[in-house]
Image (tube, rainbow, N blue to C red):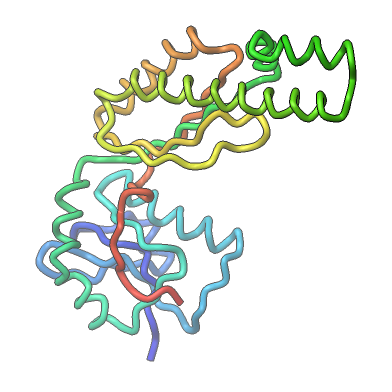
């Protein structure tokens, strides 16, 4: 029996031609639909190509309709199993909840000038180390730099969230990227708030950059805000 790879859930309706030509189809019932494609065998290997293909399907549909993304690699046994998922009350509730929402990924990164910005907080230890360069003094200075940078991250993150708060429905916090990462934020917003968020970030950049730089990705499906088991990861 051919299994079905599950990309997520959406409202019933026509598929974009490009997706239909790739073998993507909707299993529909009562105005809801499972986004699927036939698969001969599982598990599905998490290669870059497969991950990008999954994201492409979900994000292409999200351009025109609500999508509740399934976790990569989720497979259901057959069409009947997909139809059973559509009967879950949580599916309808989340389709309604996220009908007009998108996710934005906001990353903050410092350039090296942040070290100058935090220099006053560690000046005493730095001068002591220069005068008497001991191992203990070097460790203390290093710890102080790390702590001062963490304090700067916390202040900037709070500042950014305060500025965006009235435009954001929900927030998830991830780990900053790299040595000079400031924050990684997943923002749940209404679709019509995306331009407003971009404008707010331009104003924040004028005030906080340098050393803080912003990278905004999206709008995306609500990856970080769909907490629903749609099938069995294969």
Looking at the picture, does residue 187 appear above or below residue 141? below
Which residue, as the protein is rendered here, is positioned at the far bottom? 1
> Is 42 placed left or right of 104 in the picture?
right
Q: Nearer the viewer, residue 114 or 108?
A: 114
Instruction: State which quadrant residue 72 falls in.
Output: bottom left
Residue 113 position within the rendered picture, expressed as x and y whole percent measured from the top left: 68, 14
Which residue, as the protein is rendered here, is positioned at the far left? 30
Quadrant of the rendering where the N terminus is positioned: bottom left
> Is 177 placed left or right of 190 in the picture?
right
Q: Nearer the viewer, residue 181 or 137?
A: 137
Residue displayed at 55% across by 12% down: 209
Looking at the picture, does residue 162 appear above or below residue 51? above
Residue 5 position within the rendered picture, expressed as x and y whole percent measured from the top left: 40, 73
Residue displayed at 78% across by 30% down: 139
Residue 8 position within the rendered picture, expressed as x and y whole percent measured from the top left: 32, 62
Residue displayed at 47% across by 30% down: 216
> Is 65 placed left or right of 151 in the picture?
left
Residue 44 position within the rendered picture, expressed as x and y whole percent measured from the top left: 52, 74
Instruction: State which quadrant residue 143 falls in.
Output: top right
Residue displayed at 60% across by 59% down: 48
């Amino acid at each position: 029996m051919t299994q079905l790879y599950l990309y997520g859930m959406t409202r019933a309706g026509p598929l974009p031609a490009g997706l239909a030509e790739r073998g993507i189809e909707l299993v529909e019932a009562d105005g809801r639909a499972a986004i699927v494609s036939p698969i001969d065998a599982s598990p599905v290997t998490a290669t870059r190509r497969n991950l990008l293909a999954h994201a492409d399907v979900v994000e292409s549909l999200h351009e025109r309709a609500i999508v509740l993304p399934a976790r990569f690699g989720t497979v259901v046994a057959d069409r009947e199993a997909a139809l059973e998922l559509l009967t879950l009350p949580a599916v309808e509730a989340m389709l309604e909840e996220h009908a007009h929402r998108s996710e934005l990924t906001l990353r903050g990164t410092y350039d090296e000038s942040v070290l100058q910005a935090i220099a006053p907080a560690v000046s005493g230890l730095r001068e002591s180390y220069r005068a008497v360069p001991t191992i203990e003094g070097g460790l203390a200075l290093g710890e102080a730099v790390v702590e001062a940078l963490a304090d700067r991250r916390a202040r900037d993150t709070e500042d950014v969230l305060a500025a965006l708060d009235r435009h954001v429905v929900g927030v998830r916090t991830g780990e900053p990227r790299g040595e000079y990462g400031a924050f990684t934020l997943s923002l749940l917003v209404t679709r019509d708030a995306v331009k407003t968020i971009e404008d707010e970030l331009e104003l924040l950049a004028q005030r906080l950059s340098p050393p803080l730089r912003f990278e905004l990705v999206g709008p995306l499906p609500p990856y970080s805000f769909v907490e629903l088991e749609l099938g069995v990861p294969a």
